[in-house]
Amino acid sequence: MKKHLRLSVIVPICNVEKYLRQCLDSIVASTLKDLEIILINDGSKDNSLVIMQEYAKRDKRIKIIDKPNEGYGKTMNRGLDIAAGDYIGIVESDDWIEPDMYETLYNLAKKHKVDIAKGRFFQFDDKTGETEHLSSLPEYDAEQVINPRERPAIFTTGASIWSAIYRRDFLNDNKIRFLESPGASYQDTGFNFKVWAMAKSAYLTMKPLLHYRVGHASQSVKSKDKVFCICDEFKEIERYMADKKKKFHALEKIFNRVKYGCYKWNYNRLDGENREAFRKAMASELSEAVKNDKIELIDFSYRDRVKLQKFFQPDSIRLKTEYIFAEIGRWFVKTKNRHGMKRWYILGFFPYMETPTYLEKRKGELKW
């Protein structure tokens, strides 16, 4: 009789021999033993495949797919198509996990019968060797079951798709897959939005469970050659949601808010002609959303709103002046969000007011 698998772990691999052993050691040592480890070699030209084969000889749970380079999206979809576990996890081949990561998430997922269980992660700087705790989760939604459709905060956090596990039947029933653009980046953006848009339940834990490596030269996301790849991801989201008009209508403001956040991040990493070309594309896509009140801006400060307008009118003397005054004001009045409340401080030390965040105000509004 075929052994029941609780979890499938998918590891996409391409020219990462320097970090691969640390990654695989951490997965093999997982305290959750009933799993399969799917290693997908995406045309590596270094010794990655040799390392994969070495580990496969020692651990029968490891399966290897060796194929020509096809890109991240197609690589991940190959893994999703053959995964047999009740839940699916993803580990990037330059990251590593805590021993109890999958046991923790699996137990939470089964106990609460949710589509997704997600935790925090550590950020490890490869250049400095320093580690810091990162939380891209809304704290006041953590340690409880939530309906993502009713909690817009989850859409505005970073994708970090590798800090979660997903119920396999949920992904398959909703045909949730990655965009397969060759040589593209940011495919986690579209996958992440689809997941939250379609999930009926999720459990978030504030426990850090994975080590996310940053600061090394091989990170493709830092490539300036991929100026417009992020745009393709949002076109893919719109394609996916095309036959789900009621859902997309409820999410349209959040969709544009997420798009703005991702586009702004992409804009800030560019320079020269690439930066200006992307700014024009960004302005073209988002100006109508702003004009027609189809972007969620409730929690934007005056400075944030001026900054948004500057993308559309970069040469406006008025907006430049307003932004300078907004920056000065930011030194005098600071805010901190905690448990759904925004606390206001004068000079960063003296509290004088507390108001609900826009996310707290909008609980339940996206339900359909």
Image (spheres, grey):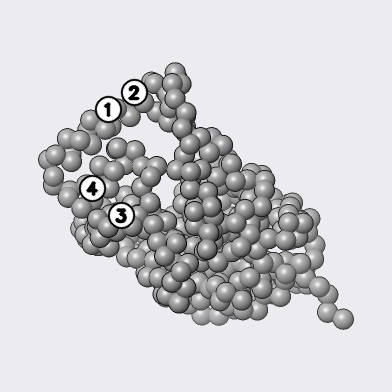
Which disc is residue 309 wearing?
A: 4
Residue at image mark 2: 332
Q: Let me know if residue 142 appears in the view.
A: yes
Q: Secondary structure at mark 2?
A: helix
The answer for how far apart the CA atoms under marks 2 and 1 are is 7 Å
Q: Which residue is mark 3?
A: 293
Give yes or no for contact between labels 2 and 3 (Cβ–Cβ under 8 Å).
Answer: no
The answer to which of marks 4 and 1 sits earlier in the sequence is: 4
The image position of residue 207, as x and y in percent, is 66, 44
Residue for point 37% across, 70% down: 235
Residue bearing the label numbered 1 = 328
Nearest to viewer (mark 4 / mark 1): 4
Q: Closer to the camera, 203 or 291?
A: 291
Instruction: Kindly identify the residue that appears in the image at 72 percent across and 69 percent down.
Output: 86
- Element type at marker 1? helix
Residue type (three-letter) at the residue carrying disc 1: Ile
- Residue type beneath disc 2: Phe
Residue under the image location 50 percent in, 40 percent down: 128
Neighbours of disc 4 within 10 Å: few (<14), some (14-19), many (20+): some
Query: Residue visible at 53% across and 35% down?
Result: 338
Q: CA distance from mark 4 to mark 2?
A: 23 Å
Measured Cα–Cα span from mark 1 to mark 3: 28 Å
Query: Residue 16 versus residue 38: which sits nearer the camera?
Result: 38
Q: Is residue 336 above or below residue 228?
A: above
> Is disc 3 surrounded by few (<14), some (14 to 19) or many (20+) residues within 10 Å?
few
Q: Tell me which numbered mark, 1 or 3, is placed earlier along the sequence.
A: 3
Spatial CA span between label 2 and label 3: 30 Å
Q: Residue furthest top?
A: 350
| Tag 3: amino acid | Asp
